[in-house]
Image (tube, rainbow, N blue to C red):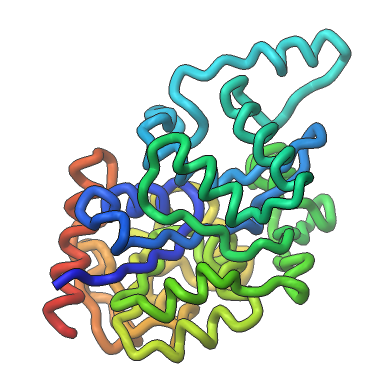
Amino acid sequence: MAINVVVLVGGVGGAKLAFGLAQILPPENLTIIVNTGDDFWHYGLRVCPDLDTIMYTLSGLVSKTNGWGIEGDTHAVLDAARRYGEEPWFQLGDQDIATHLLRTNAMAAGETLTEVTRRLNTALGVQHCVLPMTDVPVATIVDTVEHGELAFQTYFVRYRWQPVVKSLRFAGIENAAITPAAHTALQNADIIVIGPSNPWLSIAPILAVPGMRDLIVSRDVPRVAISPIIGGKAVKGPAAKLMVELGYEQSAQIVAEYYGDVINGFIVDTIDKTLPLPVQHTTSFEIVMNSESDRIAVAENMLQWVQSWV
C-alpha cells in the first residue's frame, strides 16, 4: 500500500534526507516542506537558500563538495562586482544567479513563492513536490552578544555563525499562513517527518507559521524526527554551539524534549541509543549520511521502522 510522507526540512542535512526519500518514494507520495526563514534580498534578488538546496540536490546539480550551490559553478558576476569596489560576502554562482533572477521576476509579476518554486523545480526535472513553508516573507533574526540583531545570512555566512546568540525571532511570522498546498499535504500525510535539520534555525520557523504546529499535532499519524545531534555534537553547522548559547545541554535528548508533542517518534544514532528519550516510540541506527547510499539507507530504515509500529 502506498504511503504519503511529508518531510519538514532546512539546510544540507534536511536535503540529504529528502534525497534519500525521493529515491524510494514516487512523486505522488512525497511532499517536502522547506524552511524559508533564511530567505533574503541580495542585490535586488530574492534568494531562497534552503529551497534552492533542495532543488539542486533533487535535480542532481548540487555541489558535491559543499552540499549547496551548483557543481562547477563560476563566479564571473561577483568577480566583476569587485571591480566596482564591492566585497561580496555571500557567494552567488553565475548559474545560481539565473535561479534568483527568474524567481524575482516571477514574484514581481504576481506569482506566489509556491508557484514559482514548482515551476523552477519542474524545469530542472524534479518531480517530487517541493513547497515553501509559507508564501509570506519571513526573516529569521538572530540577536547576538557582539552585534545585536543580525539578519540570518549576515550571522550565518558573513560572520560564519561565530557571534554568541542570545535569542531568535521570526520577523513577519504573524502575517504568515499555511499555504493550501502545504495544508492539503499535511492533512493527507500518513507519516510526518522532521529531518535532521537545525531545530532552532531550520525547523522552528516552519513550526512557527500560524496554525502549522497545531495542524501537525492534530494528526493521529506517526510524527517522527531524526536527531541532528550525534554524541553531543552537530553533524554540520551551528546546532550544538547554538544549544549551549541558548542554555541547553548538547544532547539528542534535549532535541526530543524541544520538539515535545509535535513528535511521537524519535530516531537517534547508535552512539546515543542508551539516552532516556521522552518520546513514545524511539529507535537507533546509523544516521550519518556521507554518501548517496547512506541517505537512501537512512530513509529506508526510517520508513521500515515507522511502519512496524503503525
- 218 or 183: nearer the viewer: 183
User: Considering the image in quadrants, where does the N terminus appear?
Assistant: bottom left
**Residue in front for this viewpoint, 247 or 190:** 190
Name the one closer to the observer, 18 or 178. 178
Residue 251: image quadrant is bottom left
On screen, residue 244 versus residue 59, left or right, reads right
Residue at left 72%, top 29%? 89
Residue 228 visible in image: no
Residue 140, quarter of picture:
bottom right
* 33 over 308 or under it: above or below: above
Q: Residue at x 48, y 62 (%)?
A: 33
Query: In the figure, is residue 200 to the left or right of 42?
Result: left
User: Residue placed at 33% from the left, 53% from the top?
Assistant: 17
- Judge whether 220 appears above or below 295 on screen: below
Q: Residue, x 29% and y 78% (percent of image)?
A: 190
Report if residue 28 is visible in the image. Answer: yes
Within the image, what quadrant is residue 142 found in?
bottom right
Counting from the top left corner in percent of width and height, residue 232 is at: 39, 61
In this rendering, position of residue 31 left or right of residue 82: left
Q: Position of residue 177 (x, y in %)?
A: 66, 74
Q: Farthest residue in the right direction? A: 84
Which quadrant, please, contains the C terminus? bottom left
